[in-house]
Image (cartoon, rainbow, N blue to C red):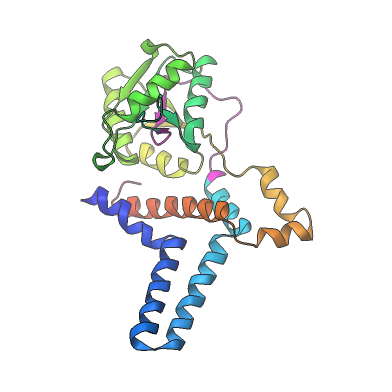
Amino acid sequence: MFLYLSKLLPLFLYPLGIACVLLVVSLVMLLWGKKTRGAAIAIALALVILLVGGNSWAARSLARSLEWQNLPLNPVPNADAIVVLGGATRTPTPPRPTAEVTEAGDRLLYAAYLYQQKKAPLIILSGGRIEWYGSDSAEATDMAALVENMGVPKSAMIEEPNSRNTYENAVNVRQILTERDIRQILLVTSAMHMPRSLSIFKRLGITAIPAPTDFLVSTQEFQELINSPAAKLLSLLPEAVSLHLFTQALKEYIGILIYWLRGWV
C-alpha cells in the first residue's frame, strides 16, 4: 500500500497535477456555484503554476540544485564493486525486439565504462519490477543483458531482482555486500537521483563513492540562459521539456521528504 500511495499521491503535487485540480475546481464553481471570482482565482493560480514550472530558468535551476551536489570525481577511485540502480530500462515487450534504455540509460553506459577502466571487478545491478506494470522479467535481468552487450562478461555481474524503490535497492544490495565481504562501492545512478540514493546507502552503513551520470543540466546549458537578453526572455516562456524537467526535480525533493519522514535518509 505504501508503494502504491508513494507513486499516486505525489502526482497531485506536481505542476500539471495541481493545475488540473485547480481547473476542475474552477469548472465546478462555474457550473454549480456560479462563483466567477473564485473560479477566476483558481484559473489564475493554475496558469501561474504552469508558467513557473514550465520556464527553463526555474526548471534548470531546480534540477541543478540536485545534480551538482555530487559532481564526478577526477580521477574516479577504485572500489570493490560498481552498484547500478534501476530505472534505466524499458521492458522487452512487443513490439520492442529487446529491452531498451530510457533517458537514464546512461547509468548502464557509465557502469560498463567504469568496469572497462578497471575501477572495480564486479557490477551489481539492482532493480525489480512493480507488480502492476505486468512485466515477466526483472529490470536487473534486462540491465544485465544490455551491459553484457557492452562487453562486460556475465561472470562479472550480479543481479539483484527484487527491489521496487531506492530504499529496497540499498537494503538488498547491502545483503549482497555483506555476503561477499565487499567493503567499498562505486554508486552509479542519475545525478538528480544521487543525493537521495547516497543518503540511503550511507545511512545503512555502506561505504559508497558517488559516481553520478545522466546530467540533465550542464554548465553550458545553464550559461545559455544568461547569454543575452533574448535568451533570458525565451527562458521565461513555458515549454513541455522544461515542465518535465521541473517535475522530475520536484519528484526527487518529494522523495527525499518522504524518505526523511520514514527515517530512511
Q: Report which quarter residue 91 is drawn in.
A: top left
Q: Return the x and y of residue 14 as percentages of the image width and height.
A: 43, 60
Q: Report which quarter residue 178 is drawn in.
A: top left
Q: Return the x and y of residue 216 as percentages of the image width and height.
A: 57, 43
The reply, left or right, for residue 54 in relation to residue 265 is right
* Residue in the foreground of this view, choosing between 215 and 33: 33
Residue at 46% from the left image edge and 40% from the top image edge = 194
* Residue in the foreground of this view, choosing between 240 and 167: 240
Q: Return the x and y of residue 146 as percentages of the image width and height.
A: 43, 21
Query: Magenta stretch: residue 177 in it?
Result: no
Residue 81 visible here: no
The reply, left or right, for residue 75 in relation to residue 43 is right
Query: Magenta stretch: residue 76 in it?
Result: yes
Residue at 72% from the left image edge and 50% from the top image edge = 224
Residue at 36% from the left image edge and 30% from the top image edge = 94
Task: Determine the residue located farthest toward the left in the rendered image.
Answer: 1
Q: How many marks?
A: 0
* Residue in the foreground of this view, choosing between 184 and 196: 196
Q: Is residue 24 above or below residue 258?
A: below
Residue at 53% from the left image edge and 23% from the top image edge = 77
The reply, left or right, for residue 164 in relation to residue 157 is left
* Residue in the foreground of this view, choosing between 191 and 201: 191
First to last magenta residue range: 67-89
Q: Is residue 44 above or below residue 114?
A: below
